[in-house]
Image (cartoon, rainbow, N blue to C red):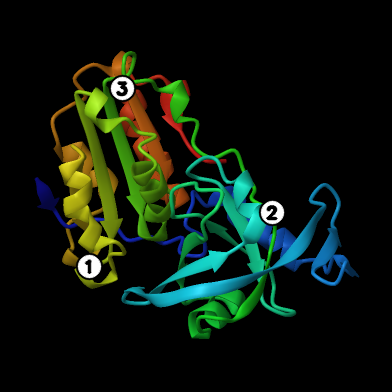
Amino acid sequence: MYTSLSPTRAKCSLHPFTCRKTVQHTAWLQSRQPACRRTRGLAFTVRAGWNDFEWSKAKIVEHEKAAEGLVKITVDMGGLAKDYTKGGQYIQIKVGDSKPAFYALASAPAPDKPVEIIVKNQGDTAEILCDSKAGAEIDVSPVMGKGFSVEKAPPAEFPYLFIFATGTGIGPIKALIESHALKVKERQLTRLYYGTFNPEMTAYKALIPEWQALGLEVVDVYSGFGQGYVQDAFGKDAPIKDAKQTGVILCGQPEMGEAVKKLVISQGVDEDSILTNF
């Protein structure tokens, strides 16, 4: 059942994936201006220490409102999409001379299809993207990151799976759901705690019935109703049935991640069974 309990605001809205490392990385990028050179007319090579890659041209093919203050953007990356193989991977985007921003991919991996991202209208590049239209040209990095290693929590060994997402962190969780990487029907319980400020600021709300039809339990948590956060909603539920057979996926603000980790570890969940995408 789709449950509205009311708790979690995504304080880290810059990026749709677990954010501490991301924020540090973004600050690092902003603190220096990497030298770029044009190559083959369509790509730029960035030289920034360990983070060497070519910027490539991409095109926005769809641009629509996802929720209050959020925009869903579909991007044609051409052949770069072939390197997108796991939910939780991400790309960097810039527009002209804007500062690069990180966006986790929200669509299921598909080498011959455009990718989807959720953008909160906050920050230099984000504001440009939110004001853009279909057909606009942007610069993108190659697909980056390891994604969520859900293969480390196979259903036979982890029949219980708890997922925690806040704000735009729902994007890469959507990718996991739609790619069927979670193998929901093979588990005894797969439950998503999804935290936003209120229903109007909840991206993909219309998809929740489809996710439930797959067997996913969804606990929708609205912090704007004054009842706490996703970790509070989880803490009010019955204790974990079998900690050694329980996996956890985290995607959202660092404070949420730390709070949830503390809770589940206190109930006996192994830290190695807690998955993030960084």
Coordinates of residue 128 in the picture (x, y in percent): 57, 82
Q: Amino acid at mark 3?
A: Thr
Asked if disc 1 and disc 3 are in contact, CB closer than 8 Å, the reply is no
Report helix, strand or loop for mark 2. loop
C-alpha span from label 3 to label 2? 33 Å
- Out of 152 and 123, give the one closest to the viewer: 152
Q: Residue at x 17, y 45 (%)?
A: 212
Q: How many marks?
A: 3
Q: Residue at x 35, y 46 (%)?
A: 178
Q: Quadrant of the C terminus?
A: top right
- Out of 85 and 218, give the one closest to the viewer: 85
The residue to which callout 1 is attached is 198
- Out of 29 and 74, give the one closest to the viewer: 74
Q: Residue at x 40, y 22 (%)?
A: 153
Q: Amino acid at mark 2?
A: Pro
Q: Using a 10 Å C-alpha cutoff, classify the residue at mark 2 as few (fewer than 14 neighbours), some (14 to 19) or many (20 or more).
A: many
Q: Using a 10 Å C-alpha cutoff, classify the residue at mark 1 as few (fewer than 14 neighbours), some (14 to 19) or many (20 or more).
A: some
Asked if disc 3 and disc 2 are in contact, CB closer than 8 Å, the reply is no
The residue to which callout 3 is attached is 246
Considering every residue shown, the one lying at the far left of the view is 1
C-alpha span from label 1 to label 3? 29 Å
Q: Amino acid at mark 1?
A: Asn
The residue to which callout 2 is attached is 142
C-alpha span from label 1 to label 2? 34 Å
Q: Is residue 257 above or below residue 134?
A: above
Coordinates of residue 247 in the picture (x, y in percent): 35, 26
